Structure formats: structure tokens, C-alpha cells
Amino acid sequence: MAEKDLIIEISDVSKAYRASKRMPGKTALENVSLNIPRGSFFGLLGPNGAGKSTLINILAGLTKKSSGSIMIDGINQDEDPRATRHRLGIVPQEVVLDPFFPVYETLEYYAGYYGIKKQDRKTEELLKALHLSDKRAVNSRRLSGGMKRRVLIAKALVHSPPILILDEPTAGVDVELREQLWDYVRHLNEQGTTILLTTHYLEEAEELCDEIAIINHGRIITHQDKTSLMQTMGLKTVIVSLEKPLDNVPECIAGFNPILTTPTTLTLHYDRNEHHFGEVLAHLQKAKIIIQDISTEEPDLEDIFRQLVNQEQAA
């Protein structure tokens, strides 16, 4: 099998903050290693304070790492930080815009900052793609939160970076705008842009990403392609609608973690790596339970995320 073409290579990166009179010392990242394939839609997930933003700030050159190395598009970050920054477009969590600049001038200014000649700028294209054309002359302070998010994405793309980093890009954004943003980001990814996404909306990561890493307490606890990750957790749920109500759960199905959610609804859980569905049915039959209806549910990314984080915290 051919090796993947990697666009970001993070090797044993750590970040420790020294103790001060006001704050105790803290290790934000501990020996983080992560390889991100070129052209992928990569999800970096983790609870608040897990280290996601610290890692992104290190990639962006805003925070200095304590140790380790980073290669971005084949360039060592320590040897040529300016070149590596040029290959990144970053949409931060915080809305950072000059409140007195109109949208068009904001994008033109940032294109000039990256040294892009006027004839090579794609300001009009970005305004159209992000539905900002009618806001071109509006000052940033007069835009809604959702419109400001669009400007942040446009600003990150003025220099056509091969990597777009989205740090919680749809926080506080309405559903319609969220869908428009994702349509555009999907288009960018299809055109070859590598996307690195952090998000609290796990359903977004499940729908959009092809590779997912989970970070907790500054350590990567798993990194897999999405399909493998979803299959890693074999837990399956069986929901049984009963013809007659039950007063208590029969002992012979206790091994399937049964919960009587209502007198006529029984929920069972089993690991498909250890059992198969036929065993569940056989035990229900042995318990003389008359089934009116039955359905199954697979774990989603949120279930897997919680389970992995809980396991890591308990370790």
C-alpha cells in the first residue's frame, strides 16, 4: 500500500506553561504526533481545554512550542516560519475584524498583506462564493455574527492557501448559514484544499470528515479514518417494543445491560465483537418475552467520543 502524501506532520510536540505568581504551571500538550494527509477533511475533536486551540495556535505560529517538530507542506516550521504561515488559512474561534473597514477593503487589505498583486486578487470571487456581495461596502461592526464568520473565512482564503484551518467555525451560527458555509468548504476540499476542523458539533464531524483524531488532556487518544473509528466501538443497541408490560427485567437477559425504559419498552446493549443479534433474540425467547416490534441502533460519533474520553479519564 502506497504511503499517504502528508501535508502536515506533527512530531512529539509539547507545550508547557511555567508557573507564575498568579497561575500554576500547566502542560497543555504532551508529545503530540499527528499526520494529516494532503487533500483530507480532517477532524480534531476534544472537550474544552483538551489542547485543540493550543495546537492550532502552534501551527499558526502564534504560540511557541516547548519541544517537537512540525512540517507544513514539506517545510520545517522552525527553519522557515514565514513560508509555513503562508500555506495556512486560519479561521479562529474569536471574531477578529477591524470594525471600521468595509468588507471589500478588509479582503483587499489582507490580500496586499500577503503580497498578492491587484490583478491576481480574488476578492470578487470570495464575496460571491460566501454570499457577501451585498455587504461589500458595509463596515464590519454593522454585520451580524453569521456574516462576520463569512468574512473570516473569506479573509483566510485571500492567498489561496493549500490548508484551511477552521477552529469552531459555526459556533453561534444559524442552521441556514451553517449549511451554506459547509457547502462552500466541501467545494474547497473537493478542489484539493486540505481542511483541518475543530468543532463541538459532533454530527458535523461525522458528516464531513474522512479522518478524525481525538485529543484529551493534551494527548492524542485516537487517530483513525472515520469508517474504522465508527467500527472500533462494537456497542449496539436493541430497542424492543413489548406486547405486554413487564414489571421487572428477566434474569436471563441481564448480560445485555437491559433497561426497562417504559413498561412496554426494553432497551438492550451488546458488543457485536462478542455477541451476535441471534443470541439476543434467543435470550428474549428464553425469557418468554412477546415482541411487538424490534429495532437496532448503531453508535454515532458522539457516543464514541464520550466513551473514549471517559476511558482515557479513568485510566
Image (tube, grey):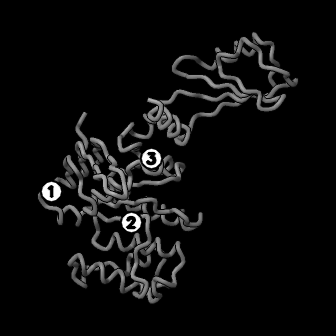
Q: Which residue is mark 3?
A: 46
Secondary structure of the residue carrying tag 3 is: loop
Marks 1 and 3 sit apart, C-alpha to C-alpha, by 27 Å
Marks 1 and 2 sit apart, C-alpha to C-alpha, by 22 Å
Number of residue marks: 3
Point out the image quarter for the C terminus. top left
| Badge 3 amino acid | Gly
Badge 3, how many Cα within 10 Å: few under 14, some, many 20+? many
Q: Is residue 82 above or below residue 47?
A: below
Secondary structure of the residue carrying tag 1 is: loop
Q: Is residue 105 above or below residue 294?
A: below
| Badge 2 amino acid | Val
Marks 3 and 2 sit apart, C-alpha to C-alpha, by 18 Å
Relative to residue 170, is residue 291 drawn left or right? right
Mark drawn on residue 78: 1
Q: Identify which residue is drawn at 23% across, 75% down.
A: 114
